[in-house]
Amino acid sequence: IGAEYCPYCASQRWAVVVALSRFGTWNNLATTYSAPAPEVNPNTPTVTFHGATYTSQYVAFTAYETATNEKVNGQWKALDKLEGDDLALFQKYNAPPFVEQGGAIPWLNIGGTAVQAGASYDSSAIVTKTHAQIAAALSDPTSDVAKGIDGAANVLTAQICKSTASQPAAVCTAPGVVAAAAQLK
């Protein structure tokens, strides 16, 4: 659960895309940016999950982009509406003691075994980059971009592996994922 205007969601989406790409296939991911100044980390390059589809034999992914990065009458324009069981889970587990501060986005429920609120890496490495520069830097494991995004993706992957009984094995036994799994609570 996130919003297109949110700079923390913008950075976290990169890690989510990398992690889930290890389990399945994305279609229709579109590039966008977080909100402009005066918001924190204005115009952070990202993708949007609104309109995207994800297919996997291992995991299901439901995304809610609750608002766009455009204001109408001083309010962020509404996008995907959170309701039903997903809303109930968000309201219950996006509050202490499950997360440090309630109402935070981005928010992830990972297979009912973990929740994550907020960005999981320092986005300073990506805020001044273009989408193409970020994508290119991901192939260089020594870059600050890859260290942040891939490091966060390894933690997400390890959390997902807990909910898939470590399947697929090639993903769940990769060295970065195994190291991340050792750090999980």
Image (cartoon, rainbow, N blue to C red):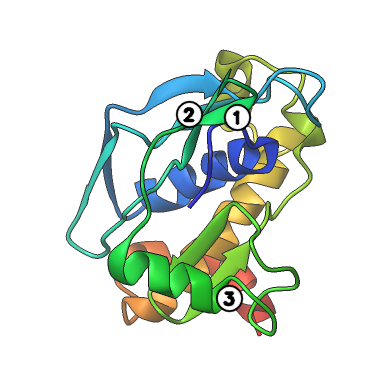
Q: How far apart are marks 2 and 3 (CA)?
A: 26 Å
Q: How far apart are marks 1 and 2 (CA)?
A: 21 Å
Q: Which of marks 2 and 3 is in front?
A: 2
* 134 relative to 100 in the view: left or right: left
The image's mark for residue 75 is 1
Residue bearing the label numbered 3: 181
Mark closest to the chain's N terminus, 2 or 3: 2
Query: What secondary structure is found at the residue carrying circle 1?
Result: strand
Residue type at mark 1 is Gln
| Residue 118 position within the rendered picture, expressed as x and y whole percent measured from the top left | 67, 56
Q: Nearer the viewer, mark 1 or mark 2?
A: 1
| Residue 31 position within the rendered picture, expressed as x and y whole percent measured from the top left | 46, 20
Quadrant housing residue 110? bottom left
Res 168 visible:
no
- Give 144 or 121, whichever is nearer the viewer: 121
Q: Residue at x 46, y 52 (%)?
A: 19
Looking at the picture, does residue 170 appear above or below residue 54? Answer: below
Residue type at mark 2 is Val
* 77 relative to 184 in the view: left or right: left
| Residue 116 position within the rendered picture, expressed as x and y whole percent measured from the top left | 59, 66
Quadrant housing residue 79? top left
- Give 166 or 120, whichever is nearer the viewer: 120
Mark closest to the chain's N terminus, 3 or 1: 1
Residue bearing the label numbered 2: 47
Res 105 visible:
yes
Quarter of the image with the C terminus in it = bottom right
Mark closest to the chain's N terminus, 1 or 2: 2
